[in-house]
Image (cartoon, helix red, strand yellow):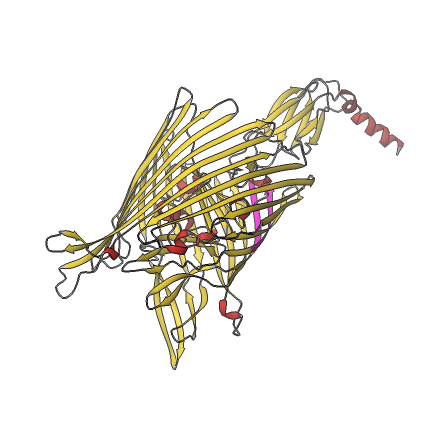
């Protein structure tokens, strides 16, 4: 025993004598310390008893030098490149290591105190990378979300596409571009097909309650679309042409350059869709023709400690809804034209005001205008005359002013961090179909969050939001998030959040009446209140050249006074409070990454509350499954990228109330979606060609089967639009740097 003790002391004696400096390992992007990084030391002096030593960094990313003089350093950390260096152990050194390409876009900003890696975030953030967007050839947000797990897409021929997250949809899902909420909801939903993927660098999705940080519309989750910034060191130009066999033709381009230390970006494009019907027997289309124009201008300049960015985004859309020819001679018809304009002006100020102290402010003015006009069409002369009926026309305008400011301290060397912020929103709605023609609403909030790390592997982050709403009394909204690193690569996250959502101006006062819709606002709506619980487990298993990421999660949402669109009488629909609504579910995912392969599979099971279970002997929840599988693979021999994106959307059962107040059982059919693509670059990425197919299972619509019991058993079937069937596409992109 004594000999072993003496030998141990002699082995580490040089460490005790000669260790004079320390080494700090930091993330090359965020400049934050990396705890538990493995560091191999090899002495180059040739005089030590033991010339190699292995140690791990502490919570501050620090590790002492074990030897005197020069020593070779090898740093390894999961998700980062191996780093080699030769340093003098007599001094203090900082070593920045870069994330590896195996895990893409690891740094997130949505909901964070400061830019943070995904693994360190207290929120379960899901990232859709630029590579994924490009591989799927997604031209808009609808295309991209159509194959996402836990997200279900709805479609209306006039109002556009919508999505639900974890069974919650409409106003409970906040959609943002660079942290700025997208305005222009129709019946509570943002039309996803209006949000172009041009100039998008990644998308950050947080499934679950974010109501204390982002306020209203954020109970179900947050989708933050992050666009590319201007470059600071070179000029870059790219242009893209896209053709799809359903007669969709798109062109877009981006230009980035630097002039006198000012960074510029200009991007824009045009999307054209000629309309489509499964059987083209009439001028009236199942999918209406549309033309979209979009543009984005950015200007940025970096001062000593302040980054200033200005962004101007513009969107214009024209939709033509051709009516059926009139009988008996089919010489005339009524056509509806819809024109949408959206303008977003944003000024971003991001300042570093001290060591790990940040001040961020956003000033935004957003404008939304939608016009609807009806014309009498003479199909023999092709002349059109505007309708003289005032009810056939409508112009609706929304203005939204937003000031959002936060001050945060996020020192990795401290057990405490915090964020305080203000959120000031003022919205005006003007239109003939708005009760009183003009309505205004203000929503002003003060919120804060504290991060506490009592132990190295445990983070506790409570937060609270104080709200003043000009139309409704708002409660205090609290939340708490926990992240516990059970093992080095095994993380547990849990959260609880209370939610409050005041009805929007559209839900209260807007009327939307045309040949296909008869929707009226309801000024007597009550505000929604809710509670949400989320929990997840995530395990990353690193190998030498790959990573296996396995995760499972559970959620439960309980909403009181849920606002939804309901049938009133005849053909009239209106927004109503339905009392209570709940969703619960779970999912299991497995992701495998190498430098050439990205494989993702997932399964989810979502339950939605049955309103009639309280009074009748019926199931409390109705459940629907989803299955997802994505593959991106780089063929090394020909340098070709292959990609496939599959999703199974399971049958969704439900219950409703029939004409005679009898309970109707119905189910919405399941369907499969598959997109594939082949992608190859030429001339050092100067030219990129991509071909592929979308919706290869040729799904156009699904059936909603309704069973009624009125005398003898009868059944009825309606159809819900999904897509325009199987298509093939080709894309050509030019990239000049």
Residue at x-position 53% and y-position 67%: 620
Name above or below for residue 493 compared with residue 684.
Answer: below
Residue 142 place in picture, x, y as percent: 38, 49
Magenta run includes residue 614: no
Q: Quadrant of residue 344?
A: top left
Secondary structure predominantly adopted by residues drawn in magenta: strand
Name above or below for residue 65 compared with residue 424.
Answer: above
Position of 732 with respect to 477 (left or right) is: left
Count of numbered circles on the image? 0
Question: Which residue is farthest left?
Answer: 381
Tell me, yes or no, if residue 459 can be seen here: yes
Name the quadrant of the C terminus.
top left
Residue 409 place in picture, x, y as percent: 60, 33
Residue 640 place in picture, x, y as percent: 40, 38
Position of 349 with respect to 134 (left or right) is: right
Residue 150 place in picture, x, y as percent: 48, 53
Tell me, yes or no, if residue 636 can be seen here: no
Bounds of the magenta segment: 531-553
Residue closer to the observer: 432 or 611: 432
Question: Which residue is farthest right?
Answer: 2
Name the quadrant of the N terminus.
top right
């Amino acid at each position: 025993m004594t000999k072993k003790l003496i030998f141990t002391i002699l082995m580490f004696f040089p460490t005790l004598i000669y260790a004079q400096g320390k080494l700090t390992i930091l993330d090359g992007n965020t400049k934050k310390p990396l705890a538990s990084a493995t560091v191999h030391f090899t002495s180059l002096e040739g005089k030590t008893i033991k010339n190699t030593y292995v140690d791990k960094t502490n919570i501050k990313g620090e590790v002492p030098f074990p030897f005197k003089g020069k020593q070779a350093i090898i740093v390894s950390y999961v998700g980062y490149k191996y780093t080699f260096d030769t340093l003098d152990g007599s001094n203090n050194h900082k070593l920045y290591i870069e994330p590896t390409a195996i895990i893409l876009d690891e740094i997130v900003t949505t909901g964070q105190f400061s830019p943070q890696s995904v693994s360190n975030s207290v929120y379960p953030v899901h990232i859709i990378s630029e590579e994924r967007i490009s591989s799927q050839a997604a031209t808009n947000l609808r295309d991209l979300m159509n194959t996402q797990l836990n997200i279900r897409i709805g479609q209306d021929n006039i109002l556009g596409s919508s999505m639900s997250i974890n069974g919650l949809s409409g106003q409970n899902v906040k959609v943002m571009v660079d942290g700025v909420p997208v305005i222009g909801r129709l019946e509570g939903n943002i039309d996803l097909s209006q949000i172009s993927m041009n100039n998008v660098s990644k998308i950050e999705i947080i499934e679950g309650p974010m109501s204390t940080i982002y306020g209203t519309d954020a109970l179900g989750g947050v989708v933050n679309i992050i666009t590319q910034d201007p470059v600071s060191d070179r000029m870059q130009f790219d242009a893209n042409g896209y053709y799809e066999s359903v007669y969709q033709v798109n062109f877009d381009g981006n230009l980035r350059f630097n002039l006198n230390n000012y960074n510029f970006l200009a991007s824009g494009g045009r999307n054209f869709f000629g309309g489509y019907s499964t059987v083209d027997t009439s001028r009236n289309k199942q999918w209406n023709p549309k033309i979209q124009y979009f543009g984005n201008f950015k200007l940025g300049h970096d001062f000593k400690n302040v980054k200033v960015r200005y962004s101007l985004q513009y969107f214009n859309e024209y939709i033509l809804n051709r009516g059926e020819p009139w009988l008996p001679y089919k010489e005339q018809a009524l056509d509806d034209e819809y024109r949408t304009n959206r303008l977003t002006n944003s000024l971003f100020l991001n300042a570093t005001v001290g060591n790990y102290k940040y001040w961020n402010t956003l000033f935004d003015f957003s404008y939304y205008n939608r016009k609807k006009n009806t014309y009498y069409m003479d199909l023999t002369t092709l002349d059109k005359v505007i309708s003289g009926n005032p009810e056939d026309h409508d112009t609706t305008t929304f203005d939204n002013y937003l000031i959002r400011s936060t001050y945060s301290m996020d020192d990795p060397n401290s057990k405490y961090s915090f964020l305080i912020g203000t959120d000031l929103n003022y919205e005006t709605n003007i239109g003939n179909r708005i009760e009183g023609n003009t309505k205004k609403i203000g929503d002003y909030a003060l919120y804060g969050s504290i991060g506490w790390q009592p132990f190295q592997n445990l983070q506790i982050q409570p937060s609270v939001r104080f709200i003043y709403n000009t139309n409704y009394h708002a409660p205090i909204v609290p939340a708490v998030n926990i992240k516990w690193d059970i093992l080095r690569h095994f993380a547990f996250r849990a959260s609880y959040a209370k939610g409050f959502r005041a009805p929007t101006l559209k839900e209260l006062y807007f009327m939307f009446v045309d040949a296909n819709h008869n929707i009226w606002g309801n000024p007597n709506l009550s505000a929604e209140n809710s509670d949400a619980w989320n929990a997840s487990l995530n395990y990353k298993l690193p190998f030498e050249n790959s990573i296996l990421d396995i995760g499972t999660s559970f959620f439960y949402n309980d909403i009181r006074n849920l606002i939804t669109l309901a049938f009133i009488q005849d053909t009239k629909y209106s927004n109503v409070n339905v009392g209570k609504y709940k969703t619960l579910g779970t999912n299991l995912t497995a992701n495998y990454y190498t430098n050439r392969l990205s494989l993702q599979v997932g399964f989810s099971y979502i339950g939605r509350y049955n309103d009639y279970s309280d009074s009748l002997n019926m199931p409390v929840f109705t459940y629907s499954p989803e299955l997802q599988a994505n593959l991106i693979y780089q063929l090394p021999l020909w340098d070709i990228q292959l990609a496939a994106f599959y999703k199974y959307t399971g049958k969704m059962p439900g219950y409703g109330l029939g004409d005679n107040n009898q309970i109707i059982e119905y189910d919405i059919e399941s369907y499969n979606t598959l997109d594939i693509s082949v992608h190859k670059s030429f001339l050092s990425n100067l030219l990129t060609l991509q071909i592929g197919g979308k919706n290869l299972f040729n799904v156009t619509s699904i059936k909603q089967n309704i069973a009624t019991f009125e005398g003898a058993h009868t059944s009825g079937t309606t159809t819900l639009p999904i897509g325009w069937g199987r298509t093939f596409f080709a894309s050509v992109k030019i990239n000049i740097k």
